[in-house]
Amino acid sequence: MFEQPLKFLVVFFVVVEPVSLIPLFSGLTAGATPAYKRRMALKAVIIAALILVLFAFGGAAFLELMGISLQAFRIFGGMLLFLLSLEMVFARESGTRTSSGEAAESKRRADVSVFPLAFPFIAGPGALATILLWFGPLHAGRDAVLFAGYLVAVCAVLLISLVLMLLAEPLMRIIGVTGANVASRLLGVILGALAVQFVLDGLRQAFAS
């Protein structure tokens, strides 16, 4: 009962990659007041939580409405996470999260909580795909305990993200951009292996059915 939520916690942590929020948040809020930084961090986490919970409860129904099998989404989700892992390993700016045009727009905005923090950096395509992959086979009523365990894991990762954003300035002085990239590379290797496993599981289930 604890093994699956713990495994999901690791996967979701690697996908959201809260460590990468440290240089991002520090750059977006450079020169701002501490009150502004706290407001942006808290607002970003709340909005991301709403998006993720919405997908957790309604994602599987949406796939069924669109006629998309969970196996097909598992294969696509695995490939998407694999692309994200490659970007993490090579420490490149993630094209699966935001484009260069979007990044430039974010620097001109006074409120950075919704875009780009909440979406696409916290509740981005990789995170949403992970939510659908893990919550999709569950029923909120029949699998209430496991469902709740996954939700607790989501909240834990979001809480970690909030803490790291609030401590972004002192943490940047300690680890720097290089330290954040090293952590990103290590997490990317783990995510790549998990992504391949998602694809293999999707193919196995598709052929079995």
Image: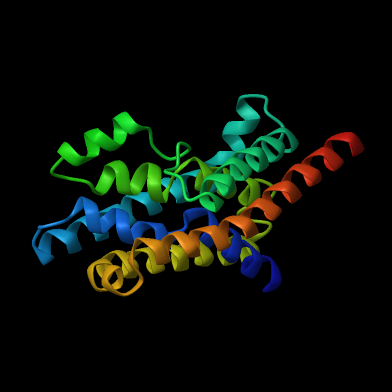
Residue furthest top as drawn: 66
- Left of 44 or right of it: where is 88? right
Q: Position of residue 35 (x, y in %)?
A: 11, 64
**Which of the 4 image quarters holds residue 71?**
top right
- Colour theme: rainbow
User: The C terminus appears in which quarter of the rendering?
Assistant: top right
Q: Nearer the viewer, residue 175 or 21?
A: 175
Q: Is residue 193 visible?
A: yes
- Left of 8 or right of it: where is 50? left
Q: Position of residue 22 (x, y in %)?
A: 33, 61
What residue is rendered at 56% in x and 52% in y? 89
What residue is rendered at 67% in x and 42% in y? 78
**Which of the 4 image quarters holds residue 177?**
bottom left
| 9 w.r.t. 206: above or below | below
- Left of 150 or right of it: where is 29? left
Q: Position of residue 46 (x, y in %)?
A: 32, 55
Q: Nearer the viewer, residue 42 or 168?
A: 168
| 49 w.r.t. 203: above or below | below
